[in-house]
Image (cartoon, grey):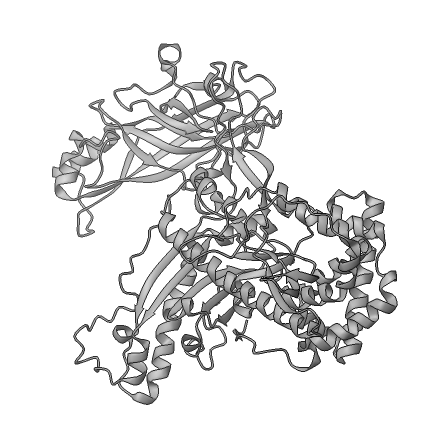
Amino acid sequence: MSVVKQHLRSGIQGSLGNPSALNSALKLALTNEGGTLSDRARANSVVAGLESLGETELGVASTGLAQNRSWLVNKLKDSATASVEQIENTFGPGLEAATVILAASGNLSAYADAAIRSQAQGDNVVQTAGQGSQGSMMFGEPTAALEAFDETPLKEMLDYSVSWNLHAARQDAFGEAHFRTIVVTPELGGIDITVPLVRVFDKADHNNDGKRYDVKMRNLVDAYVDPTVLADESTKVVPAFLGADNEAAFVPAAAVAVRNVLVAGVPVPTAPLLIGEEHDLLGLSAYEPLLGMNALDINDALDKGAKISNLYVQTAAGKAAIKFSTGSIMRNAFVKSPEGNYRELILSFNTMLRLDKDTKAVDGTAVTELAALVSGGYTAVFEVKVKGDMNVELGNTSVTAMGLKLRSLKDEDGNEVDTSSGTGATIKAAVEASKVIGYDIDARRTNSNRRTVGIRLNNTLQTNRYHIPVGAPISIQAPHASNTDAADLKALIATTRVRNSNNAVTALLNTADFLEEHFIPGLDDAEIVSLFPGMGRYLIKPYFEKHTLDIEKAINSIKSHEKAEDIAAVFVQAIRDIAIRLIQRSRYQAALDVLTGGTGTMPTLVVGTDQVISRYLIVPGDTRTFGETFQSSKIVVTQDQRMFGKIILTLTREDQDGPDPLSFGNHLWIPELVTTVANVTRGNQQIKETQVQPRTLHMVNCAVMGVIDVVNLHKVVTDKIATPALATDISNPYLEGHTYVPPAP
């Protein structure tokens, strides 16, 4: 889990970084062997899209693409004297883009035509970070022109198209860390991303009033942070109080009032069962709004784990009862009887219960008979013996209780109190004159007949289509008779890569601005899905934090030679503090467990910043700089001036090949063809013009981000600062203005 620090590459070493030399080798190889790399069928499979092919055609097309890729790697290895690993690391997605062009070489006009058609009919269905306060990503104006392409000039420029895609389908390390590049074929002009979801619901019946049907499904991810999502008690036996029809089975309302208990989303009116009577628990719990019109029958049975959860004691005055919780006391459960029917259970529950100065009746009132105990601060312990039997097949249950016996009376200092006279005798008489009048039972049906469905799960798929807009063209002009093709290609590659990198920063900053404006803790799922970008919104809760880090206030350094380490400590602590909340408040780990079945690894923390700040983001000797929560951490820098004095934190999963809803973003690239027009009239002169029109999109998948604006770093580094004892602000907050956002309900 060591920290990976990646700086902007100044160039690629050796001949791998020389497009002109590689292009010359490719041109020769394509002249000699190009006819074997593709035919019309293989080209058409790329144009139509592999998803549209049948099983046989898909196998043939996939094999052809693999052969093209292998051919290209071998040619690069031979011409550049490089290993396969070096080639893979150098070009990455560029290999995939160049392979697509090679496969399309059997019908280049159809490939070019498909790219234009997809541009004309595509629809930008999903909001992207392409436009915002930080500018746009230089998309060209949409056009519907469907020019007919001539195969001959496209064939002549095939080596340039392969080389351009090989070298240009990349961005700098900063952009790639936040937006991993994915190559897309042009058939749809975009990409469909599908996320599998598991949703939880409990009621699925339609109403007959004609009103809008609403099932109120919850995302399974919610259950990790909200246990009520899966808190289902649909088989719980809750005796339903139905008024005059069955009130004889319950304790009088004067002793304990009827209350509602929520079972599977249905409120069931209930009260304690009357002790000393036999009750049919299955019949009493057959509540129609919960179980429907069909009453429980002989095919229903009680589970053998029933126990007494509460006892209710009433004093001699016959007023409100006192409730004693017994759910966790040993011997409170019905057990198999040593003799008799195998479905008969017995209860022998002997225990000690306590009364003290805090004892009150169930309605919150003071118990008059215990006034002496309360005022004197006494603690009384009494014994109660409860017996019972149950037939789990029939549901018949009977519980009885013997009289109460006072076993101990102590004053507030823990001293035993004489109960033969005085106050002790008064308390003893009051306790032993009381009696157990009712009980609550914790029981469940076996549901062996599958009468109750319980928690319902729904597997579904959510799909969004991302249209990849055509970019503004990049052109280079030369005199008609010039021989600068190699230099022209190199210029096109460099310009495209710089623009890709600029677009990555634009998309990142536009996303930060969007989240700062729209993020509010506590939004429900419907609001999140309708408002926020990215397929991750179906799994995670979007989360955003932004703070100003004033290094002059935060630093606590008194020795110049320790200043750099102190600055590093301030940065690292600030990043750790925010990064862990990105995981916690977004429900990231819960989403990861649901998506991967608990087998996924934690993400990499991407720390993007400028070249000045990056030198302080490594703690010497600390291999887990930003904590153990993350699989790893990656520090990436950019020379883009818009990132000067900024730190941006995002999350990514580096082991994913395709679009990933739990990685911050992706850079989508459609391989394009390079064209040269030999006779172009510009300003009354004939020139040669080489042009390419990149189609790329930086899209956000997982809207989870932290932003730190760093101020006064240069003052601390170059100037003498006040010692802590002389500082005017001795509180030294390292995140000025930070307030903890409470977890969303």
Task: Evaluate whether residue 421 shows in this view.
Answer: no
Tell me if 530 is positioned left or right of 478 in this view.
left
From the viewer's perspective, is residue 285 above or below residue 107? above
Tell me if 235 is positioned left or right of 725 in this view.
right
From the viewer's perspective, is residue 727 above or below residue 498? below
* Rendered location of residue 409, percent (x, y): 22, 43
* Rendered location of residue 243, percent (x, y): 35, 13
Q: Quadrant of the N terminus?
A: bottom right
Tell me which corner region of the image, top left, top right, bottom left or bottom right, holds residue 452: top right
Tell me if 514 is positioned left or right of 556 in this view.
right
Residue nearest the viewer, comparing 125 with 333 = 125
Residue nearest the viewer, comparing 689 with 282 = 689
Q: Quadrant of the C terminus?
A: top left
**Residue at the extreme top:** 244
Task: Evaluate whether residue 240 shows in this view.
Answer: yes
Q: Residue at x 50, y 23 (%)?
A: 213
Residue nearest the viewer, comparing 275 with 121 = 121
From the viewer's perspective, is residue 61 above or below residue 163? above
Residue nearest the viewer, comparing 495 with 601 = 495
